[in-house]
Amino acid sequence: LHTVHISNVKGSATRQAFSVNSYKDSPLQDFTFKNISITAKAAGTIQYASNWLCTQMNIQAEDHSKVVVKDSTGVKGLE
């Protein structure tokens, strides 16, 4: 899956903001997230992603965790 744009999303009372896992030889590529606000129990994880850009991203995790990005390249804006 590649070249996906997601914007203007608000989520609340979710278990995880992200639960993403693809395959090493087929990462999820070129995703853009803009104006996203999520309140969740945990921030979650992203694995096997490539070239993701997050702008105006607000993730509030009840456990104060940050999104864990592993085995991925070019995932920006989740800091």
Image (spheres, grey):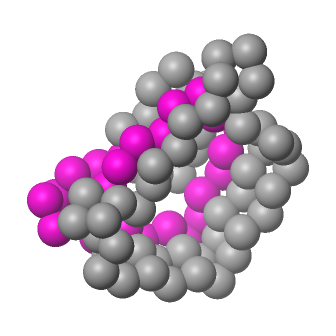
The answer to whether 74 is drawn above or below residue 14 in the figure is: above
Question: Residue at left 52%, top 20%?
Answer: 71
Question: Residue at left 84%, top 43%?
Answer: 2
Which percent across, then down, holds residue 46?
A: 49, 40
- Dominant SS of magenta comes to strand
Give the camera-side residue of 79 and 7: 7
Let me know if residue 49 is in the magenta part. yes
Q: Is residue 50 visible?
A: no
Say left or right for 59 vs 75.
left
The answer to whether 51 is drawn above or below residue 71 in the figure is: below
Say left or right for 21 vs 78.
right
Give the camera-side residue of 53 and 25: 25
User: Which stretch did the figure color magenta?
Assistant: 43-67
Question: Residue at left 35%, top 49%?
Answer: 44
The answer to whether 43 is drawn above or below residue 49 in the figure is: below
Give the camera-side residue of 11 and 7: 11
Say left or right for 30 vs 45.
right
Say left or right for 37 vs 34.
left
Q: Quadrant of the N terminus?
A: top right
Give the camera-side residue of 22 and 63: 22
Which percent across, then down, holds residue 24?
A: 65, 17
Question: Residue 59: which quarter of the image?
Answer: bottom left
Question: Residue at left 50%, top 84%?
Answer: 10
- For this orientation, the residue located farthest to the right is 3
Let me know if residue 65 is in the magenta part. yes
Q: Is residue 70 visible?
A: yes
Which percent across, then down, holds residue 36?
A: 54, 75
